[in-house]
Amino acid sequence: MLVGVPAETKDQENRVALTPGGVAELTHHGHPVLVERGAGAGSGFGDDEYAAAGAELVDAHEEVFARAALILKVKEPTPPEHGLLRRGQLLFTYLHLAADEALTRALLDGGVTAIAYETVQVGHTLPLLTPMSEVAGRMAVQVGAHYLERTHGGRGQLLGGVPGVRPSNVVIVGGGVVGTNAAQMALGAGAQVTILEKSADRMRYLGEMLHGNLVTVMSNRQNVAEAVARADLLIGAVLIPGARAPKLVSEGMIRAMRPGAVVVDVAIDQGGCIETARPTAHSAPTYDVAGVIHYCVTNMPGAVPRTSTHALSNVTTPYALALADEGFAGAVRRDPALAKGVNVHAGRITYAAVAEAFGLPHTPLEELLYQAAA
């Protein structure tokens, strides 16, 4: 199968879908790989490294889409790329369709088979989302601390304080992978950390695993409002796989925060869990609501591409290899986890949460595969 790796077109997205090592795995299995020149530059991979791994380098972005049967990307296609996708083509990338109706309809109209990294599911885990959730959770504290500095518009506070001065209050809504990694970073910096979580078992686990100035609180409207009002740094870390994030923090709660406080909504890819959150980009990452700084960049890990590309390619390459080796139907029949990643196939929405988000029909993938085989 001919595999294509285009350069990313999202604002300051410096990751690339495959490392040279990933290319070498595919070519070793007999699959030719097209790589757009310069695609790996932001992550520190030169064209010569891809060529040495067996890739064919091409100059035109459009050529990758025109020739490849399987397109590997990091982020969802941007509007100029919608028309480059073609019927029967496989697209394997982060999609977050429940927050993007235009892209959903473009994939449906184009007859593309779209597999989302973020909905590939093994048991209760999301193995292709986890590495980037780990990166984003850790980055949330890093960027939050940056914008808490007075020189960047914040309250002028150090996360951990100093002897005789209270540490900053970091409030994390959600105790999953993002929330856990954010808490580790914040606790390591000496902050006072509150995690709001609805699972008692998860709170017990967090209490046993994390050490420092940590409080876990049951997530309900009253507790969220009280915690948010005290927060110096508020991190949104809620995820419902494949679905829009619920709005757990209202605009009224944000307006009750102190001026110079900072909000980082990591759930913004799925629409955000904070009512005042709207997508931003690395080129203009923040905005102000009632004196509260909001950082809502939809591709946070793109700021640390060397780390992120390695972490992502480590987990996505085996699935890409399965698709190339076995073809779409064979790969998803063999691997139920990969089948759960399929969001759109043959002009139908196959992921229920995406269909629900837009009031569109949902067709189970098994039904479409059966029809194709009949």
Image (cartoon, rainbow, N blue to C red):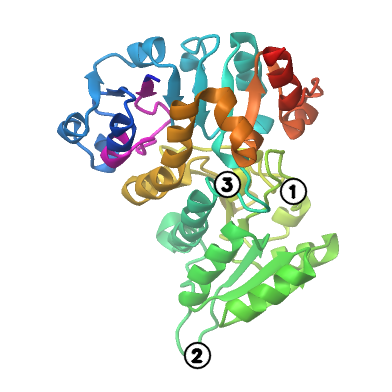
Does the rendering let one see residue 11?
yes
- Compare residues 135 and 368 and report the one nearer the observer: 368
Is the stretch drawn in magenta largely helix, strand or loop? Answer: loop
Q: Residue 100 at x, y = what percent? A: 64, 27
The reply to whether discs 1 and 2 touch (Cβ–Cβ < 8 Å) is: no
Q: Quadrant of the C terminus?
A: top right
Q: Residue 156 at x, y = what percent? A: 47, 67
Q: Is residue 279 left or right of residue 4?
A: right
Q: Tell me if residue 309 is in the magenta stretch.
A: no
Q: Which mark is residue 251?
A: 1
Q: Is residue 56 left or right of residue 137?
A: left
Q: Is residue 359 above or below residue 301?
A: above
Q: Residue 104 at x, y = what percent? A: 64, 21
Q: Which mark is residue 130?
A: none
Q: How many marks?
A: 3
Q: Which residue is mark 3?
A: 288
Q: CA–CA distance between discs 1 and 3?
A: 12 Å
**Which amino acid, mark 3?**
Asp
The magenta segment is 3-23
Q: Residue 309 at x, y = what percent? A: 37, 44
Q: Secondary structure at mark 2?
A: loop
**Which of marks 3 and 2 precedes in the sequence?**
2
Farthest residue, direction front: 374
Q: Secondary structure at mark 3?
A: strand
Name the image quarter holding residue 47. top left
Q: Residue at x 49, y 79 (%)?
A: 190
